[in-house]
Amino acid sequence: NSVSGNEDLFVFAIPEHRIVSVKYKQQIVWDKDQRVDRVFGSMKGNGETIDVVIENYADWKKEKDEQDHINRQRQAEVAFRIKAMLGKERFDVLKDTSVSLQHPSGSLMATDELITQYIKTALNIFRDARSGDIDDKNVEDSKVKQQMDVESLYILSELVALLPDDLLRERILLKIESHVERLEGRKPNQTTTVTSQDLPELNEDDLSEKFVRGSGAGGQKINKTANRVILVHIPTQLRVECQDTRSLQQNRKIARKRLRLKLDEFINGEKSRTGLKGAKVASKKAKTKAKNRARQRKKAAAKEDD
């Protein structure tokens, strides 16, 4: 009847008594692996305590059922496209390899070495599938092969984005991104977009991230892939979306930079990067207007003299 121990936080105290996780009906309310504590609201519980969980359970279950239905549809669509690219036999190998990472005991079982090997295996499957469809001269071009590997990793990330284990999904996506950076000759976290210097840091535990099908112009590359990122900062409920590219990985990076800018504005107001930039633009416009008015007054005075 006691969970007393050396730990201060409930989320760490329970494992001392060999309890793996705790659920209220179907909702996880405590899990050390995922750093979730909705009993006392610490860690990824984000302040949501067990009484709130019980009160809002019906709404949570409804939303979960709707999201599960959407995920099943997306899984079917992604599977259909990848199967068409790889063929049934190769697709089954890729599927079995993906399932092998999802151990019943959770994402702790998937070591970094296993995840790296999974990505290498997936790449080899994609390479084998395209080997018979590409001109031999192009295959010998290392840049062409690297770009094709990047495209294959982007496609793989769509499949990984549908994994139910949040922690495992994040770990694999980060590994895929590091592979892409290496293939493209980029340094880690190097991008061509706005610099992130002096912006507030994001705690991944405070983020809610969803991947949904893109919309708008772009054809099948946008509208048939789950590359649109919806990112929410839970403590402030700030929300950003990104589908600027057809790469899920790049959209995740851009979304995080946008959220950091938004969080900076939320915290620092007029002194934020966006606020200072806006003030600079406003000041420039005011100076331009003042010059124009002075010029008009000068012209009017010259006409009166005539």
Image (spheres, helix red, strand yellow):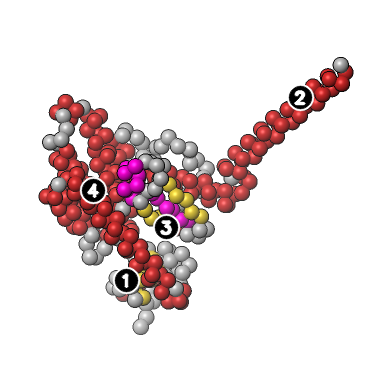
Of the image marks 3 and 1, the number of the one nearer the N terminus: 1
**Picture layout, residue 272 above or below residue 290:** below
Instruction: Name the image quarter holding the C terminus.
Output: top right
Of the image marks 4 and 3, the number of the one nearer the N terminus: 4
Dot 3 surroundings within 10 Å: few (below 14), some, or many (20 or more)? Answer: few
Q: Which residue is mark 1?
A: 21
Query: Disc 1 residue type?
Result: Ser
How far apart are the alpha carbons under marks 3 and 2? Answer: 54 Å
Comparing 300 with 59, the one in front is 300
Is 73 a magenta residue?
no
Q: Secondary structure at mark 3?
A: strand
How far apart are the alpha carbons under marks 1 and 2? Answer: 74 Å
Q: Which residue is mark 3?
A: 208
Dot 4 surroundings within 10 Å: few (below 14), some, or many (20 or more)? Answer: some
Q: Which residue is mark 4?
A: 81
What span is in magenta?
A: 219-233
Q: Which residue is mark 2?
A: 295
Comparing 132 with 283, the one in front is 132
Q: Position of residue 66 (x, y in %)?
A: 36, 65
Label 4 with label 3: CB-CB less than 8 Å: no
Q: Give the foreground label among 1 and 4.
A: 4
Instruction: Name the image quarter holding the N terminus.
Output: bottom left
Of the image marks 1 and 2, the number of the one nearer the N terminus: 1
